[in-house]
Amino acid sequence: MPSNPLLQVENVSKTFRVHGKKLHAVENVSFTLEAGKTLGIVGESGSGKSTLGRMVLRLLESDKGRIIFDGVDLSRVKKKELRALRQNMQIIFQDPRASLNPRMSVGDAIEDAMAIHKIGTKASRRARVVELLERVGLPDEIQYAYPHELSGGQLQRVGIARALSLNPKLIICDEPVSALDVSIQVQVIQLLRDLQEEFNLTYIFISHNLAVVEYLSDEIAVLYLGEVVEQAPADELFQAPTHPYTQVLLNSILKIPDSPEQKQEMQSIQGEVPSPLNPPKGCTFHPRCPFAMDVCKTAKPDKKAVSEGHYATCHLVGRSEAAHAN
């Protein structure tokens, strides 16, 4: 654990009321993130990834736990101070078209946050807009265009430029390439990596695409029904996944073999994700787990260390049966 991490998330949880029932969106999630690093958050749809990202920015209020950003406990910050802090915390949304005001030109959309925070003069802000457009690979005349005139890839570059406009320290990337064509995805991913190196940006990268997460992340947290079931450095997670859910996720990646001998059948996770309105008792993954034991059905597993910096929430950790999962 870094001595002075940029971000500390401590036991945060979030529930919603749906038809009179509690929907468990995020449950007791904790992690730390060092400046200049990337935490990848992966999991199936409905695992709580986007909810967690919005809680970090306090776009959603957590029910319990603490989120400490740059030494400041966000739960204790009043709205006026929070607005000032948000200059250092930005987000890139999954759907760039939906996140941009259709009545605002591209230039106005990028300038807007700078105007709200009273940064510079009108002339200096417009110069900054041109500079940002150039940095994300767009011509300066696009500042006069409107969202409906641009492609999805161009719009996402605009979203990135808007996120950069306030010189943030932390950017939440919420599925930023999932709506783009594959060829455009590669360009945007490389752009995000280049920008991180240039500006020492810190990312939380939310995605269901494990190949993308592996490429960008220093550390990965795997979510299932709102809980972190495994967390490890990216290299170690891909080389030695411990939790059965992580293993099946990795085995579901489409890989092109170098030779016929390396050809493997893709594996899929059996069954459907249980409803977060009524999560299973014990280990929430046990109804779909090929290695489930009786204890998994009744007792919730504790977080256990697999190695330094590698944790998994599974009854198999430390047992001889864990070898069968690999």
Image: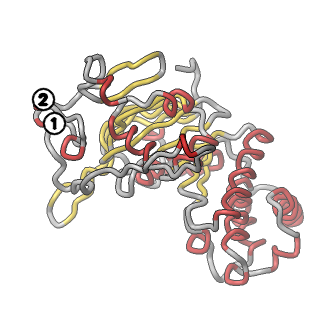
Residue ID at (88%, 70%): 140
Left or right: residue 25 versus residue 74 is left
Q: Which amino acid does label 1 sit on?
A: Gly
Residue 14's place in the image compared with 310, above or below, is below
Q: Where is residue 63 in the image (x, y as percent from the top left)?
A: 30, 45
Given residues 41 and 200, the one toward you in this image is 41
Residue ID at (74%, 59%): 161
Please say if the residues under marks 1 and 2 sit with CB atoms less than 8 Å apart.
yes
What residue is disc 2 on?
Answer: 295
Q: Position of residue 235 (x, y in %)?
A: 57, 30
Q: What element carries label 1?
A: loop
Q: Which of marks 1 and 2 is nearer the N terminus?
A: 1
Give the crowd class for mark 2: few <14, some 14-19, many >=20 residues within 10 Å. Answer: few
Residue ID at (60%, 47%): 89
Q: How far apart are marks 1 and 2 (CA)?
A: 8 Å
Q: Is mark 2 on a helix, strand or loop?
A: helix
Q: Which of marks 1 and 2 is in front?
A: 2
What residue is disc 1 on?
Answer: 282
Given residues 159 and 208, the one toward you in this image is 208
Q: What residue type is labelled 2?
A: Val
